[in-house]
Amino acid sequence: MIGAPSDDRWQKAADWLAEGPGDRDVDLAVLGVPTFANSTAKTGAHATPRAVRRALGRLSTWSASRRVDLADVLAPWDRGDIDDPDDEVEGEFRVRVALETVAAKARLVVVLGGDNSLTYPAMAGLFGDHLASAGLVTVDAHHELRSTGGPVRDLISAGLPGEHVVQVGIADWANSRSYATEAHARGVTVIGRATVAERGIADCMRQALDTAAAGNGGLYVDLDMNVCDRAVAPACPASLPGGLSAPEILRAAFLAGADPRVRAVDITEVDATRDTADERTVRLAAMCVLEIAAGLATRVEP
C-alpha cells in the first residue's frame, strides 16, 4: 500500500491517477520528464516524478474548499516517464514527440520534472511551428537566460517572442544585473517577489497569464519550485529564504490549471533525493499537481 491506509471511503489521489480514463476522453495527462544530467548543479531530480506519484498516495481527491472531487469530474491518464530525456542524440526528440502526442489527447498536460532543462523541449514540442504565437509564464526565482541550460533563452532563440514571456517571483540576490538587463531588452515582463508580496499571487498570476496570452496561441506555465521559500522547499537546490510560501505556489498552480488558455504546466527543480525526512518538498509538488487538476475541474471554457 502507498501512503494512507486502505479505506473504501477515502479515495487516494495515486489510485485515481493510476486507474486511467477508462472509456472517457482524457482531461488531465501526467507525463514524467526526469531530466537531471545537464543541470548546472549536481541534482537527483530524475528521482522526483516517481516520488511525486508516491506522495499522491498520501493525498485524497477531495478539495474541501471548492467542494470538488477530482475522481468524479476528471478522467486522468498517467503517461509514465520519458526514457533518458537527457540523451544527447534522442532525448530532446523524445520529449518533443511525447508532448505533442499527449497534448493531442488531453485537455491539459502536467509535466513532472526533472530539472528546468525540460521546459524548452516540452514547450517546443507542444507548440511546434506555432511557438511564435504561444506564451510562457514562469513562476521562478531566476530569469533562466544563461547560455547553457537556460530554457527561456532557448525558447526565445527558437522563436518565442520575449514579449510573450512573463516571469513571476524573480528574487533578489538570485540573478545578475546583466541577465536582468537582458530580460528587459528582450521584452520579458518581470513581476518580482516583492511585487507578489505587495499585490498578492492571484493578481500577479492573472496579469501574467493575460500578458503572456497576447499572441492568442495558447500558454505554457513553468512552476520552478525553487521560487519557494527554502523552509517549505528544502529539496530545491536553488531555493532561498523569503521565496513564495506554500499557499502562494499552490494558488499559482490552481490559477494555471483554471485558465482555459493554458495547455501544459510543468513542475521542476525538486531533487527528491535531498528532501527532508517528512518529504515536505515532494508533498508540496504533489499538492501542486492536485491544485492544477482542481483548476482544470473548475475551468469555465470560452
Image (cartoon, rainbow, N blue to C red):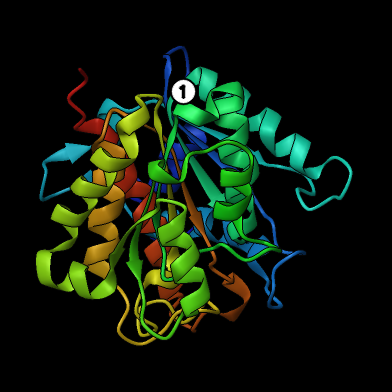
Residue 215 left/right relative to 174: left
Residue at 52% across, 74% down: 178
The answer to whether one can see residue 91 in this image is yes
Q: Secondary structure at mark 1?
A: strand
Where residue 247 sits: x, y (%)? 22, 66
Q: Which residue is mark 1?
A: 106
The answer to whether one can see residue 245 in this image is no
Where residue 67 sits: x, y (%)? 11, 41
Q: Amino acid at mark 1?
A: Ala
Residue at 79% across, 44% down: 91
Where residue 115 sits: x, y (%)? 61, 61
- The answer to which quarter of the image holds residue 31 is top right
Task: Report the number of discs.
Answer: 1
User: Which residue occupies the foreground of this view, 156 or 200?
Assistant: 156
Residue 98 left/right relative to 255: right
Residue positioned most to the front: 185
User: Which residue occupies the foreground of this view, 271 or 13?
Assistant: 271
User: Which residue occupies the foreground of this view, 241 or 33?
Assistant: 241
Residue positioned most to the right: 89
Residue at 11% across, 65% down: 199
Q: Quadrant of the C terminus?
A: top left
Residue at 39% across, 60% down: 58
Where residue 74 sits: x, y (%)? 33, 28
Mark 1 neighbour class, 10 Å CA radius: few under 14, some 14 to 19, many 20 or more: some
